[in-house]
């Protein structure tokens, strides 16, 4: 079982005040390509896995956004870490029909 949930909202600065959504899409592509379990939500994406692996995905997201032309990136991150295990499903199962 995973030991960490990490929720991230990337806020890329865009050249010439372009729409930021294409940059956010690139960040989500990095998550998808990583293979970690994740859930995309309207204001943030939550990933589930091992802490070091998830932090590596965050690093790759930032690098991908800079490579795509964003001059800088701010990320708001929330981390829930439990060495005995944690999952998105367990935390949300009582809210599902």
Image: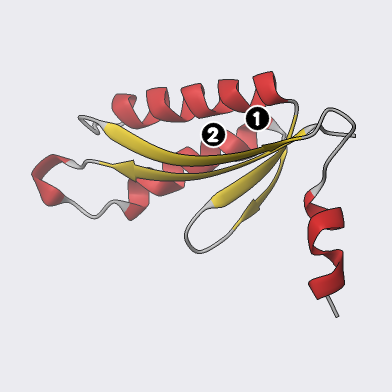
The answer to whether 1 appears left or right of 43 in the picture is right
Is disc 1 surrounded by few (<14), some (14 to 19) or many (20+) residues within 10 Å? some
Q: Nearer the viewer, residue 81 or 31?
A: 81
Labelled disc at residue 57? none
The answer to whether 25 appears left or right of 82 in the picture is left
Q: Quadrant of residue 54?
A: top right
Q: How many marks?
A: 2
Question: How far from the left and from the top, in percent, is residue 70?
Answer: 24, 34
Write the residue at 46% across / 30% down. 61
Write the residue at 57% across / 27% down. 57
**Residue that sits furthest to the left in the current view:** 16
**Residue that sits furthest to the bottom in the current view:** 97
Q: Quadrant of residue 2?
A: top right
Q: CA distance from mark 1 to mark 2?
A: 6 Å
Question: How far from the left and from the top, in percent, is residue 88?
Answer: 78, 52
Question: How far from the left and from the top, in percent, is residue 85?
Answer: 87, 36
- In the structure shown, which secondary structural element does the residue marked by tag 2 occupy? helix
Q: Is 96 rendered above or below residue 49?
A: below
Identify the image quadrant of the C terminus: bottom right
Question: How far from the left and from the top, in percent, is residue 33?
Answer: 63, 33
**Where is mark 2, residue-wise?**
30
Q: Nearer the viewer, residue 17 or 94?
A: 94
Write the residue at 50% across / 40% down. 77
Labelled disc at residue 34? 1
Instruction: Tell me if label 1 and label 2 are in contact, CB under 8 Å.
Output: yes
Q: Is 74 rendered above or below residue 54?
A: below
- In the structure shown, which secondary structural element does the residue marked by tag 1 occupy? helix
Identify the image quadrant of the N terminus: top right
Q: Is 7 rendered above or below residue 54?
A: below
Is disc 2 surrounded by few (<14), some (14 to 19) or many (20+) residues within 10 Å? some
Q: Is 57 rendered above or below residue 97?
A: above
Write the residue at 18% across / 51% down. 18
């Amino acid at each position: 079982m995973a030991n960490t949930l990490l929720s991230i909202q990337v806020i890329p600065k865009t050249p010439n005040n372009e729409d930021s959504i294409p940059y956010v899409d690139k960040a989500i592509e990095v998550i998808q390509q990583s293979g970690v379990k994740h859930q995309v939500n309207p204001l943030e994406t939550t990933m589930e896995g091992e802490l070091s692996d998830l932090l590596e995905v965050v690093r790759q997201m930032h690098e991908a956004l800079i490579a795509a032309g964003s001059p800088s990136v701010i990320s708001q991150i929330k981390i829930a870490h439990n060495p005995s295990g944690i999952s998105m499903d367990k935390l949300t199962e009582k809210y599902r029909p």
